[in-house]
Amino acid sequence: MAKHSVSLASDCQFWMQKLSEWDQASTWETQQDTCLHLPRFQEFLRQMYEALKEMDSNTIMKRFPTIDQLLTKTCWNPFILAYGESQIILIWCLCCLINKEPQNSGESKLNSLARSLLSRILSAISFDIKEVGLFAQGLGYEPVDYYPGLLRNMVLSLVSELRENHLNGFNTQRRMAPERVMSLSRICIPLVTLPEFEPLVEALLIYHGHEPQEILWPKFLEAVNEAFLGKKISLSTSAVVCLWLRHLPSLEKAILRLFEKLLSREGNCLREIECFIEESLLPRAACHPAVFRVVDEMFRCALLETDGAPEVAAALQVFTRCFVEALEEDEQPKFALKTYFPYAPPALAAALLQRPRGAPEEHWRQLLEHGSQLLRQLMEDQTQRSLGGPLESWFLFTHFGGWADMAAEHLLRSEAEPAEAVLWLLAFYHSPCDGSRQRAQTTVEVKAALGRLQQLSRSTTLSARDLQAAAGLGGAAEPRPAACPALLRCLLLNFLLWAPAGRTVAREAVALVARTEETAHEIISFLDRTLYRWDQLCIEAPGSRKLARELLQELCVQV
């Protein structure tokens, strides 16, 4: 790299001398010499750009102290501007000189020069330089004042033309040629982060011609997506949706970037995860079924790769809640629920979408039983089984996993006989691939554990080990391994939060159960989901909420 910079610095001196010669004389011989050297000079500009894009403005000026003079002379040479891709390469080079946050007067001056030269080049695309210069001078304007205004007007003119084309549809006499639209998108590649070009970038994204193939340059779509993900550009939701619908790799990159953000920071609570998801604009974009199906498929892959990790399932549930809220904001939905969940009966999807916010707890059982019956019918339907089997049904239910947590809480807090439908729902959620016989055995164990826990809730003395044994998680009372330990841990944790007797030994019981890192993470995820769900359903639980927060903080520190 250093040798290459030295070579480029030497080339800089050579071309500076050439540019000075071409600038001072306008003879036929000078023009011939200019044309003779144009291919070599364009290749030099290309190499210069490859070097500049790896440096900041300070490094650029140290390595190439005359770069500002060289680019200025280049921008005023009509032969160079008219040759090949010189204009585009020049734009790229000038963008490398711009510092988003100038730290001193030198950097500010360099910014001003680069912006002025950019304006001039872009003006030269549509106007004759000599005529524009004479006209501006006649009005008493200096180039530094005139060209920025001309740039703004040019951008607004192009935006207006694109929108007019969009509205006129098949009116071919007024349509912008596809080649010109593609050329515009290509020129905009290095300019997408400049505020002056945001209206044009957005207009290009929203523009739809009638060509069978994409007319926007792929690198332009990639550059816009990268700028949006890096928060270097502000776009409307409709423009972002258009971007992701036009360019699938950009949508996939946005989803992967969100996953990286969710998984790279340890200790993220669901409130923070909700903020990340909302900021990504993916829930709003997912109101278009094509976007939803891509996001949904990537969540499915993430769940399968992690064997249904609670953290991934919780992120999916938060995303689904944000997506449902975005759907509800649209007073006239454009697509039916069947479009988003093609394998689910509409009645089941509608039931799962219900959020019993503020509903009395006595209504929970009715809602849970109804959802369980619909899900069980789907499981037993041979036609549906051929479309995906238990895992497809489980994935659908996982979107709305808050129902499973609500079912476990209901069983612990209700004094009525446990409903078989609610027991089946919990057994299915925690072990979707179990056969009917194994699931029946799980419901028997869960029912027995519930009975023992209810008995302990009336006991005057309670130890953590007694509680662990009563929940079926080991000890003298339960020598055999539990059929579904995750479900039994869920019941135990609900008992600790809600039963007064359980709160007295909560810390000791959690310490006994969270003996492995995997189990500790599972408990952290449960506590976080519980606090988040209580907030969403407006559940008043002062003592339980305080204990859940304390346990969550202590476990996060330990892990």
Image (cartoon, rainbow, N blue to C red):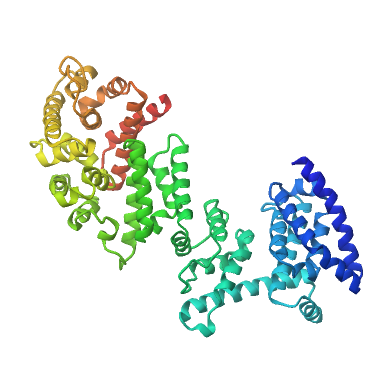
Q: Is residue 497 left or right of residue 20?
A: left
The mark tally for this picture is 0
**Residue 297, percent from left and from top:** 35, 49
- Viewer-proximal residue, 74 or 513? 74
**Residue 24, percent from left and from top:** 91, 68
Residue furthest toward the left? 417
Quadrant location of the C terminus in the rendered image: top left
Regarding residue 469, the answer to whether it shows in the image is: yes
Q: Quadrant of residue 402?
A: top left
Quadrant location of the N terminus in the rendered image: top right
Q: Is residue 247 above or below residue 230?
A: below
Q: Residue at x 25, y 26 (%)?
A: 503
Q: Is residue 200 above or below residue 103?
A: below
Q: Is residue 426 left or right of residue 90?
A: left
Q: Residue at x 33, y 56 (%)?
A: 325
Residue furthest toward the bottom? 173
Q: Is residue 315 left or right of residue 446?
A: right
- Viewer-proximal residue, 72 or 150? 72
**Residue 193, percent from left and from top:** 61, 58
Q: Is residue 215 left or right of residue 310?
A: right
- Viewer-proximal residue, 294 or 382? 382
Residue furthest toward the top? 476
Regarding residue 26, the answer to whether it shows in the image is: no
- Viewer-proximal residue, 226 or 213? 213
Q: Is residue 311 above or below residue 29?
A: above
**Residue 176, percent from left and from top:** 55, 77
Q: Quadrant of residue 98?
A: bottom right
